[in-house]
Amino acid sequence: MQDDAKERLAVFDKAAELFGLLSTPIRLRIISELCNAEKNVSQLLEGIETAQSNMSQHLNMLYRAGVVAKRRQGAQVFYRIADESAALVCRAVCTQVAIEMKEEG
């Protein structure tokens, strides 16, 4: 296989990995919330109704994938967007879906 073809396949693999990570509504909501400001788990739970353990699990997945970063301040852990391209994809897709839903309804 040629190097160009390998590079294209790698791009598609990476994109599929990102789309897989963004395939759950709660992760999209977490990214949306963090686009506005850095937040801790309690602050995220104010806007996203789920169990704390579920929130932590999804945050951990986003952290391991490099989409979010975290910092500890005392007992609190604050999360922020680390991968702006993932946030951009999230915003673009959600904005387009919202436009289409508005046009339909």
Image (tube, rainbow, N blue to C red):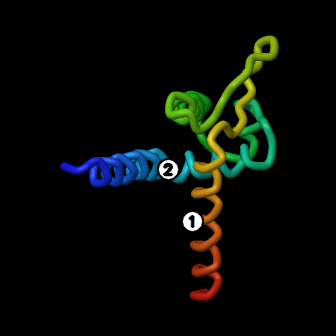
Which residue is drawn at the image coordinates 46% and 47% (left, top)? 18
Which residue is drawn at the image coordinates 72% and 39% (left, top)? 44
The residue wearing badge 1 is: 93
In the image: residue 103, left or right of residue 75:
left
Task: Classify mark 1: helix, strand or loop.
Answer: helix
The image shows residue 94 at horizontal and vertical percentages of 60, 65
Amino acid found under the numbered disc labelled 1: Val
The image shows residue 33 at horizontal and vertical percentages of 72, 47
Q: For residue 70, what is the image quadrant?
A: top right
The residue wearing badge 2 is: 22
User: Marks 2 and 1: in contact by CB < 8 Å?
Assistant: yes
In the image: residue 42, left or right of residue 98:
right
Q: Residue extending furthest top? A: 74
Task: Classify mark 2: helix, strand or loop.
Answer: loop
Mark 2, other Cα within 10 Å: few <14 / some 14–19 / many ≥20: some
Q: For residue 59, what is the image quadrant?
A: top right
Front residue of 75 and 20: 20
Front residue of 84 and 41: 84
In the image: residue 35, left or right of residue 17:
right
Which residue is drawn at the image coordinates 34% and 54% (left, top)? 8
The image shows residue 55 at horizontal and vertical percentages of 59, 34
The tag earlier along the polypeptide, 1 or 2, is 2
Amino acid found under the numbered disc labelled 2: Leu
